[in-house]
Amino acid sequence: MTDPTPNPALPHDFLPALAHLKRRGFGETVPTVALILGSGFGEVEQAVVDPLRCPYSDLPGFPAPAGTAGHVCRLSQGTLWGVNALVFRGRYHAYEGHAPRDLAACVWVAYGLGARILVVTNAAGGIRPDLAPGTLMAIRDHINLMGVNPLVGPQRLAGAAAFPPMGAAYDAGLLGQLLEAGRAVGESVTSGVYAAVLGPSFETPAEVEMLRRLGADAVGMSTIPEVVTASALGLRACGLSLITNQAGSAQDSHQQVLQAASANADRVAGVLKALLRKLASA
Ligand code: HPA
């Protein structure tokens, strides 16, 4: 990006972070895609070739992600599987108590740096009976039960539509490419509806039954604020969930989720690689 002026649509809170990144060379070449890596999938970031790197802790106005002691939280830009990519290793969760808009800090910054495609990954609990642990699910649509919307606040005045439609929050073309990417690497990626709750507690069996009746196939505690913001900004978005556990089981634990995510991280990376290769040749 040759224009050094901040994008006027960005809320003021994210301008210092954007300026900091631009001073370090981020956005000098326009990224095609921004990728947000959920817990357990951080290793993908190691595949970025010749990356520029910046820890979130260096970004003014970027809240410290809570509960991430010992985890690397940083942004990288470089070539990932043939695509100029911004890779966000670490994300913000509503249950950490952040302000609504901060939940999508990565998306605002990605937008400010010029990315127009967002790919998100997460771990989720399976609700639909065929979604056993280890299943990969491309997000077809979502149900926001977090009780929070990232567009609440003054950024409604800063350029994003005041009442943005969500009818195409998950881009149909990208969803198709994600499913094809799965087939290309021999993974059967199914599609489904992702519901997000506030957390941090897991769901009771009655809540899981409620979610099922509402039309949710899987449940998690992230992603929706990022996709809502992306959609409001006109980014094309897609999401890939790894089912790590059966939602509502008495054994649900964060450790189990992280273990399952790490154990399947290579499969997730394989599908992402095939997707980015498709985007590179598009
Ligand atoms: N519930 C909510 N969030 C989750 C789950 C779950 O069962 N698994 C992974 N993230």
Image (tube, rainbow, N blue to C red):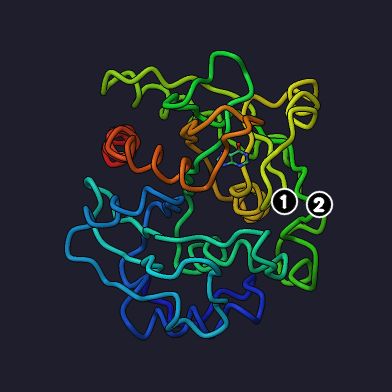
Instruction: Locate the C terminus by quadrant.
Output: top left
Q: Which mark is residue 147?
A: 2
Of 80 and 196, which appears nearest the observer? 196
Q: Which mark is residue 198?
A: 1
Q: Are marks 1 and 2 in contact (CB under 8 Å)?
A: yes
The image quadrant in which ligand 1 is located: top right
Ligand 1 within 8 angstroms of badge 1 C-beta: no
Placement of 173 over or under 151, stated as above or below: above
Residue drawn where x is 26% and y is 23% of the image: 185
The answer to whether 279 appears left or right of 172 in the picture is left
Residue drawn where x is 68% and y is 36% of the image: 195
The secondary element bearing badge 2 is classed as: loop
Residue neighbourhood size for the residue with mark 2, other residues' Cα within 10 Å, grouped as few (<14), some (14–19), many (≥20): few
Looking at the picture, how far across and down is residue 32, in whole percent? 38, 53
Nearest-to-viewer mark from 1 and 2: 1
Residue drawn where x is 46% and y is 47% of the image: 255
The secondary element bearing badge 1 is classed as: loop
Residue drawn where x is 32% and y is 82% of the image: 24
Residue type of the residue flagged with mark 2: Gly
